[in-house]
């Protein structure tokens, strides 16, 4: 899976950052039928998703 490849290459991906410890976790986001995300360009996807989850 793609996330396994990304997880195994984390040190190369984030090589420009100085870190003591690095981890990765996989989450799954599914779109609820009641979550109304319209094509409004004035609001970002994360803001729409946050507001929909609050509702």
Image (cartoon, grey):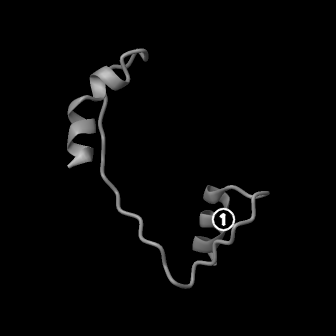
User: Relative to 4, is 52 above or below?
Assistant: below
Instruction: Residue at 66% x, 68% y: name it.
Output: 51
Residue at numbered disc 1:
48
Which SS class for mark 1? helix
Instruction: Residue at 33% x, 20% y: name it.
Output: 20
40 relative to 50 in the view: left or right: right
The quadrant in which residue 50 appears is: bottom right
Q: Position of residue 19 (x, y in %)?
A: 37, 19
Q: Position of residue 10 (x, y in %)?
A: 29, 29
Q: Residue furthest right?
A: 42
Instruction: Residue at 49% x, 79% y: name it.
Output: 32
User: Relative to 41, is 16 above or below?
Assistant: above
Residue closest to the eye, 55 or 49: 49
50 relative to 3 in the view: left or right: right
Q: Position of residue 15 (x, y in %)?
A: 36, 17
User: Relative to 53, is 1 above or below?
Assistant: above
Residue closest to the eye, 15 or 20: 15
Q: Quadrant of the C terminus?
A: bottom right
The quadrant in which residue 17 appears is: top left
């Amino acid at each position: 899976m793609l996330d396994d490849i990304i997880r195994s290459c984390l040190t190369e991906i984030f090589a420009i950052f100085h870190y003591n410890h690095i981890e990765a976790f996989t989450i799954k986001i599914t779109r609820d039928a009641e979550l109304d995300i319209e094509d409004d360009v004035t609001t970002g996807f994360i803001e729409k998703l946050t507001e929909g989850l609050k509702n």
